[in-house]
Image (cartoon, rainbow, N blue to C red):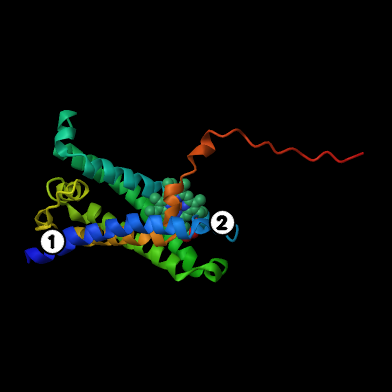
Amino acid sequence: MDFYYTLIFTVFPYLCLTTFVVGHGYRYVTDRYGWNARSSEFLEKKALFPGTVLFHWGIVFTFLGHAGGLLIPQRVFDLFGIDSQAHLTIAYWSGLAVGLAAFFGVLLLFRRRLTHPRIQSVNRTNDTITIGALFVVISTGLFNVIFGHYNVLYSVAPWIRGIVTFTPDAMLMKGVPLSFKIHVIAAWALLAYSPFSRLIHIWSLPLTYFFRSHILFRRRVPSQ
Ligand code: HEM
């Protein structure tokens, strides 16, 4: 039993992390011109807008919530007077809000991808897998928020910190409900798959856009 836990909750995450790091390097070197979000906005705008806005706001804040809530130990929150009960309450309500946004966003994007004729004609299996995997990760995460009622602060959170700090302890995942296990396994798999998908665009956030000088567009003055 312990062997399987080590395989699933120690070996598998490190395999995924290695694929994630090496895969991004490989993709960057071999497919520099394919490094983009493969936007389909010019083919269809109307259905994209609500889906992409809801999804992107939801997923970006979900990421930030996971990073803050799971990677920072509870004792740091205690120093600021946020005990584990308060921490869980904040995680529940904020997770619910951003999780619902990401869920309905990805649902709209999935529907657009599967039903809109112009999008269907450019859709690749890779795009369907990417949105499908996001759907699985987001919906199991949201399910856990709403129905899980499980304290992750002394099990899943230290386990994930152990992975990040190279002191893994798979046994912390014993006793964690199945739906949480499915969520984390699906998330690791998506992480490993991401370098080979359009998700690489996450690392090309156009920050310089906010600081560059304005581009002026002027009406062309007709020559006399
Ligand atoms: C870091 C900030 C991000 C920026 C600036 C950004 C930007 C974009 C842009 C410009 C597009 C193409 C137009 C569109 O479909 O809306 C796009 C599409 C997409 N993004 Fe992002 N993105 C970000 C983060 C993320 C994250 C964190 C994820 C998921 C983990 C994600 C997943 C997707 C997906 C799946 C699509 C394709 C939607 C579709 O056409 O069906 N993005 N993103």
Q: Position of residue 76 (x, y in %)?
A: 17, 33
| Extreme residue in the top direction | 80
Residue at image position (24%, 61%) is 185
Which residue is tagged 2?
41
Relative to 219, 29 lies left or right: left
Where is 219 relative to 4, above or below?
Answer: above
Q: Position of residue 205 (x, y in %)?
A: 46, 45
Relative to 100, 5 lies left or right: left
Q: Residues within 10 Å of mark 2 (few under 14, many from 20)?
A: few
Q: Is mark 1 within 8 Å of ligand 1?
A: no
Q: Amino acid at mark 2?
A: Glu
| Extreme residue in the right direction | 224
Circle 1 — which element? helix
Which residue is tagged 1?
6
Of badges 2 and 1, nearer the viewer stands 1
Looking at marks 2 and 1 on the same chain, the residue that comes earlier in the sequence is marked by: 1
